[in-house]
């Protein structure tokens, strides 16, 4: 049934027994109960409590032409505050806005989620527990089950992790490992090159593990004696 009252409110109602209003659609400029708005509000119960609305809002930081989608599943009155219960906004310039903690989700199980809370931004793969986080200081984190894999601090270090333990980090002078630095394979890779040599090597031991007397072929006797060596 369609009803238009003296205030201009247009109501379209539906019922299963032609006597009880079980759901309805409302069109006017006050159904949303906030500012100078024009709304289409929806009700799904006999109390005409407006659970959701699509509105043109022209108040506060809303621009002319903004379309607002609002939902309040717990509404217990005839009015719905579309600003307080905004879930999605399409701006007149084409931007799509979702309030803090609202999420873009993809996948049958909502596996991919993109959202922003009051401080940080997230890209989450919930099925595999992977998170990409950008915080308010513009720091970047790649995590798995809340364990760090990569951490990039704004204007500072980038750190790589193994099983949530830091292993190598960039520094102002280069890079610094935490742990052993071992080539992948034996007798396969060089440390430096003929025209790109290391300068000084500082170590607690002065010996080199490949120093083998049996491999030396230029050994000769010396008459300098220990007094020369001990100088």
Image: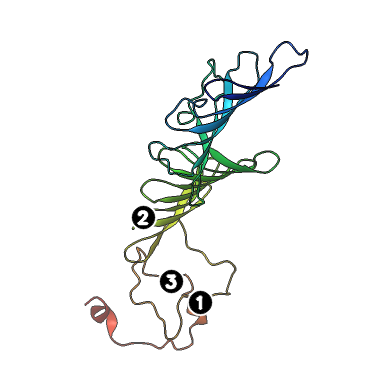
Location of mark 1 (residue): 190
Q: Position of residue 57 (x, y in %)?
A: 47, 36
Label 1 residue SS: loop
Location of mark 2 (residue): 154
Q: Quadrant of residue 5?
A: top right
Q: Residue at x 43, y 71 (%)?
A: 208
Location of mark 3 (residue): 208
Q: Is 44 left, or right, of 103 in this rendering?
A: right
Q: Quadrant of residue 41?
A: top right
Residue 189 vertical placement versus 67 (above, below): below
Q: Position of residue 144 (x, y in %)?
A: 55, 44
Residue 149 vertical placement versus 230 (above, below): above
Label 3 residue SS: loop
Residue 130 vertical placement versus 159 (above, below): above
Distance between mark 3 and mark 1 Cα atoms: 15 Å
Q: Position of residue 200 (x, y in %)?
A: 33, 74
Label 3, residues with CA under 10 Å away: few <14, some 14-19, many ≥20: few
* Nearer mark to the viewer, of 3 and 1: 1
Viewer-nearest residue: 174 or 100: 100
Label 2 residue SS: loop
Q: Give the mark, 2 or 3, whose residue is nearer the N terminus.
A: 2
Q: Quadrant of residue 221?
A: bottom left
């Amino acid at each position: 049934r369609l009803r238009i009252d003296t205030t201009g409110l247009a109501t379209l109602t539906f019922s299963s027994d032609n006597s009880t209003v079980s759901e309805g659609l409302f069109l006017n400029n006050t159904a949303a109960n906030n500012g100078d708005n024009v709304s289409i509000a929806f009700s799904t119960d006999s109390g005409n409590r407006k659970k959701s609305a699509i509105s043109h809002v022209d108040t506060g930081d809303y621009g002319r032409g903004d379309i607002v989608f609002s939902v309040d599943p717990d509404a217990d009155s005839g009015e719905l505050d579309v600003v307080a219960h905004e879930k999605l906004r399409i701006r007149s310039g084409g931007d799509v806005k979702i309030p803090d903690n609202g999420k873009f989700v993809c996948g049958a199980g909502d596996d991919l989620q993109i959202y922003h809370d009051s401080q940080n931004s997230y890209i989450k793969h919930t099925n595999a527990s992977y998170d990409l986080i950008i915080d308010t200081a513009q720091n970047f984190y790649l995590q798995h089950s809340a364990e760090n894999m990569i951490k990039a601090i704004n204007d500072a270090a980038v750190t790589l992790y193994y099983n949530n333990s830091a292993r190598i980090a960039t520094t102002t002078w280069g890079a610094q490992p935490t742990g052993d630095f071992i080539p992948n394979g034996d007798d396969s890779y060089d440390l430096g090159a003929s025209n790109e040599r290391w300068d000084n090597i500082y170590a607690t031991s002065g010996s080199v593990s490949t120093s083998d007397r049996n491999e030396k072929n230029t050994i000769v006797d010396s008459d300098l004696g220990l007094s020369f060596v001990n100088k």
